[in-house]
Image (cartoon, rainbow, N blue to C red):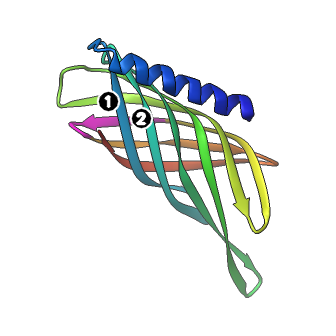
Amino acid sequence: MRRLIISILALLSVATLSAQGGDERFRLQVQADLGTIFLDGAGGPTVTLGVGVRMFDHLYVGAETGFDTMIKRYKLGALQYSRFEGYVPLGVNLKGYLFKDRDWSPYLNCSLGGFFGFYKEHWFDGFRSQVGLGVDIRQFNVNIGYHVLVHDITQHFGYVKLGYRF
């Protein structure tokens, strides 16, 4: 996990320097998303912040972090209870855009990395990935897709996110 953090920080430094160099093919892109992850009997809000570089109008490479939550509902006989889990994702985000110089552009989204989580007093970490489709409409975006967490078990979720690009 330490190598992942160092790699992401190095990528972010190179992206920032490239975007500030004045080359119009490379420009800094910051994005904030609000959304939800969901599955049968569970779900929760998610907040994501990504910083990276947009290259040649068709490719975005950046680092992302945020806070994701999962509220699971359990039923044991007549008893019902909920359990809260939260985690901080940290990873690399790639987006491939179809169009350039338009008010809207569909894209393919892929995020790979890890997460640091907590539940009660026990910290855990593992692998996290997201694959989805989205569309940028001017400064706003909508993104839907598939979310996977791997720790002791593999958990599969759907997600929907709405965002703003700075």
Q: Position of residue 51 (x, y in %)?
A: 43, 34
Question: Is 137 inside the magenta-drawn segment?
Answer: yes
Q: Could you classify mark 1 by the number of other residues whose Cα lies within 10 Å: few (under 14), some (14-19), or many (20 or more)?
A: some
Q: Which mark is residue 50?
A: none
- Whether 75 is drawn above or below 129: the answer is below
- Whether 85 is drawn above or below 67: the answer is below
Q: Which mark is residue 106?
A: 1
Q: Could you classify mark 2 by the number of other residues whose Cα lies within 10 Å: few (under 14), some (14-19), or many (20 or more)?
A: some
- Which residue in the rendered view is the most extreme toward the bottom? 78
Residue drawn at the location 33% of the way across and 15% of the way down: 21
Q: Which residue is mark 2?
A: 133
* Residue 9 seen in render: yes
Residue drawn at the location 42% of the way across and 24% of the way down: 16
Determine whether, in the image, residue 24 is placed left or right of residue 131. Answer: left
Residue drawn at the location 72% of the way across and 77% of the way down: 75
Q: In the rendered structure, which segment of residues is drawn in magenta?
A: 132-139
Q: Quadrant of the C terminus?
A: top left
Q: Earlier in the sequence, mark 2 or mark 1?
A: 1
Type of amino acid under label 1: Pro
Q: Position of residue 67 (x, y in %)?
A: 55, 54
Q: Nearer the viewer, residue 105 or 119?
A: 119
Type of amino acid under label 2: Leu
Q: Position of residue 109 (x, y in %)?
A: 46, 31
Main SS, magenta region, reads strand
Q: CA distance from mark 2 to mark 1?
A: 7 Å
Q: Quadrant of the N terminus?
A: top right
